[in-house]
Image (spheres, helix red, strand yellow):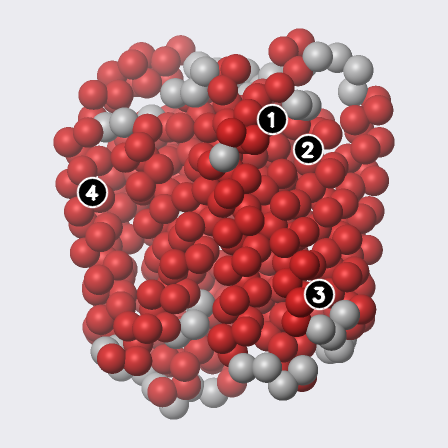
């Protein structure tokens, strides 16, 4: 069961990352204005936020199986609907639908994984799921970039849709045996108001960690290609730099060192991850040599690898299975929101690459300081912390 859910996580993020190189050129080929091109990219993340929240709420009410099944099927349909796009209006509509349906999948999948994890192994399991996200980040853009040269964006989306159909069939066959137990639990659970999640210190830090992780990704996605272009390197260099951070993160996720996430306090690894990412951004703002930029991306990959399992562990430690779906819904909404804020804020401020990286570094450093302050106040062991029930 667990490996199949990991496959769902991989292909969900694979679909997300495979869009990055091709959506803007696709919108431009339809004759869209620069505003529509930007909107076609941003509206996916915007509707993804709502999909995440809806998924979390319904997962707690119906169980993750049904929401996962529905999300996979509707996501497949939205991917096939790219063939119906004829202009700007249909492009925006399909992108909104795609983001909304894709947003249903990930919170339900991670709820499946979290509820099936032994507490002593929840950090390592979160690291393994992070490895599948990292692999998707490495292979998704490369796949769409290569395929788009020989075919079209519609074909890429149709291939992704085919994968989603196969995953829907597999989920029905392999995961349906886990529905009855979940249904019994949901009958007696008490309703939890969304504001309760924002009063719990562990959950707040998990949400903020998710936001700042993807905030940094948004900054990288916007600023790193501009810096590489300014230094007169080609686009392959940007891909190489991003791949380096992905490979470093995946290695840490999969090697035996991932056991650190089972016994180290999540708040500690979260703070170290934020400081490493801050240092890498500051270093990127100051260096022009390719070898030094590669070093910065290695440091960023180490920070990413420490941060992702930490925020997942914090969320698991701070919630009960009966409310974990809703918590993951908000959690991944913060993921989507972080990307939007990271890229749009830097764009609005119209900063050069040096100042953009310095600003991002400062924000990540302050987030790390906030985490350290919380770490010093939090003197109770993890297993004695209050959880949302």
Earlier-in-chain disc, 3 versus 1: 1
Assign a secondary structure to mark 4.
Answer: helix
Pointer 1 residue:
260
Pointer 4 residue:
168
Determine the CA span between mark 3 and mark 1.
28 Å
Name the residue at 63% across, 86% down. 232
Image label count? 4
Q: Are marks 4 and 2 in contact (CB under 8 Å)?
A: no
Q: Nearer the viewer, residue 19 or 276?
A: 276
Name the residue at 62% across, 38% down. 306
Whether residue 272 is visible, yes or no, is yes
Q: Nearer the viewer, mark 4 or mark 2?
A: 2
Picture quadrant where residue 385 is located: top right
Left or right of 286, for residue 160: left
Pointer 2 residue:
269
In the rendered image, which quarter contains the C terminus? top right
Pointer 3 residue:
292
Determine the CA span between mark 2 and mark 1.
9 Å
Q: Are marks 2 and 1 in contact (CB under 8 Å)?
A: yes
Earlier-in-chain disc, 3 versus 4: 4
Q: Where in the figure is residue 267, as x and y percent of width and height?
A: 71, 29
Q: Nearer the viewer, residue 112 or 48?
A: 112
Determine the CA span between mark 2 and mark 3.
25 Å
């Amino acid at each position: 069961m667990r490996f199949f859910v990991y496959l769902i996580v991989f292909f969900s993020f694979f679909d997300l990352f495979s869009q990055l190189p091709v959506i803007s050129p696709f919108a431009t080929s339809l004759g869209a204005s620069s505003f529509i091109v930007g909107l076609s990219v941003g509206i996916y993340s915007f509707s993804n936020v709502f999909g995440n929240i809806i998924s979390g709420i319904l997962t707690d009410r119906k169980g993750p199986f049904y929401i996962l099944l529905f999300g996979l099927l509707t996501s497949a349909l939205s991917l096939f609907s790219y063939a119906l796009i004829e202009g700007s209006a249909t492009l925006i509509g399909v992108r909104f639908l795609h983001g909304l349906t894709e947003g249903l999948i990930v919170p339900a999948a991670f709820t499946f994984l979290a509820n099936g994890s032994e507490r002593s192994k929840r950090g390592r399991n979160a690291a393994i799921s992070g490895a599948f996200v990292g692999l998707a980040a490495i292979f998704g853009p490369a796949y769409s970039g290569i395929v788009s040269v020989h075919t079209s964006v519609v074909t890429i989306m149709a291939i992704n849709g085919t994968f989603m159909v196969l995953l829907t069939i597999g989920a029905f066959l392999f995961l349906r045996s886990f529905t009855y137990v979940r249904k019994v639990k949901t009958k007696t659970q008490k309703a939890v108001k969304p504001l309760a999640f924002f009063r719990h210190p562990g959950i707040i830090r998990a949400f903020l960690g998710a936001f700042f992780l993807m905030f940094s990704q948004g900054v990288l996605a916007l600023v790193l290609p501009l810096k590489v272009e300014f230094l007169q390197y080609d686009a392959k260099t940007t891909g190489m730099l991003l791949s380096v951070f992905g490979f470093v993160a995946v290695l840490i996720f999969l090697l035996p060192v991932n056991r650190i996430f089972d016994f180290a306090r999540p708040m500690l690894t979260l703070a170290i991850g934020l400081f490493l990412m801050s240092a890498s951004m500051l270093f990127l703002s100051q260096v022009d040599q390719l070898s030094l930029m590669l070093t910065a991306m290695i440091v960023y990959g180490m920070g990413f690898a420490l941060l992702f399992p930490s925020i997942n562990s914090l969320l698991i430690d701070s919630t009960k299975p009966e409310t974990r779906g809703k918590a993951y819904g908000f959690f991944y909404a913060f993921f989507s929101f972080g990307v939007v804020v990271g890229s749009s804020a830097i764009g609005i401020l119209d900063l050069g690459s040096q100042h953009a990286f310095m600003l991002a570094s400062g924000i990540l450093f302050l987030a790390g300081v906030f985490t350290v302050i919380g770490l010093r106040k939090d003197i109770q062991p993890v297993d004695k912390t209050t959880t949302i029930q």
